[in-house]
Amino acid sequence: LFLYQTFQVQSVFYGDQSTLQTLNLLSRVTQSDRWAGLKTWRRLNDAACALLAAGLHESIQEARDVPFFLVELRKRIFSRLYSIDISLATFLGRPPRMSKKFCCINLPLDIDEKCYSLSETALSRELEDIDHAGWNSQGHIRPSAVMRWSTITAMIREETLELLLGRNIYDMQRRIMYVTRLSSCNTLADRSQ
């Protein structure tokens, strides 16, 4: 969590390396300026490595002794970092650090964070408003809904990124059709279940 926050602060302060590469073409950039963008890239790498080392990329077993808030927090941390990693990879044309091929993507439930501190009975009442796919059935647009949607679209962007940057891709036409089908709203709703 702290590595993610450090990455956010670093990216606001330094920007990213691609901006500095563009500036280098336009004017003379000092050696220290060139390394500033790399710091942001490294912070994301640190956060991604910590996430993988902690096992947040693996299937989450909801055991009786693990608190609900901890399970959901793990899902949210993974979703946030995975989405940012794929977004930056897409924007900068770089390979992603995390791939859904090696991760079990557990979408966080579409609930408010205030539910984490509720008693078991109150939490059960809140969870009744969640449909079988994990979306709230009341039509509320919460930050968790945006996070879920961001993760789902990141999975599609990863497929597209693999087609654009990948090597030795077989059956390109079939893969393009697959990504096109994934992009339809009905398919997205089904895949998030």
Image: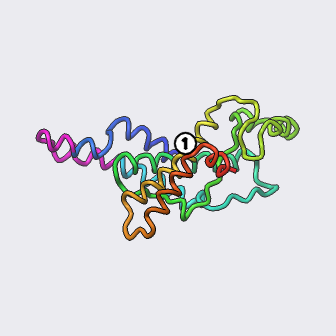
Quadrant assignment, res 165? bottom left
Q: Residue 126 or 64: which is nearer the viewer?
A: 126
Q: Is residue 71 visible?
A: yes
Instruction: Please give the name of the residue rendered at 15% of the width and 44% of the height, measured from the top-left corner.
Output: 25
Q: Residue 9 or 61: which is nearer the viewer?
A: 61
137 is higher (above) or lower (below) than 171: above
Residue beneath label 1, please?
Answer: 150
Which amino acid lies under the numbered mark 1 shown in the image of this protein? Ser
Image location (x, y in percent) of residue 116:
73, 38
Instruction: Please give the name of the residue rendered at 50% of the width and 56% of the height, measured from the top-left corner.
Output: 177
Image location (x, y in percent) of residue 143:
61, 33
Magenta run includes residue 92 = no
Magenta part mainly helix, strand or loop?
helix
Magenta run includes residue 28 = yes
Which residue range is magenta in the image? 22-39
Q: Residue 107 or 41: which is nearer the viewer?
A: 107
Q: Residue reaching furthest right?
A: 121
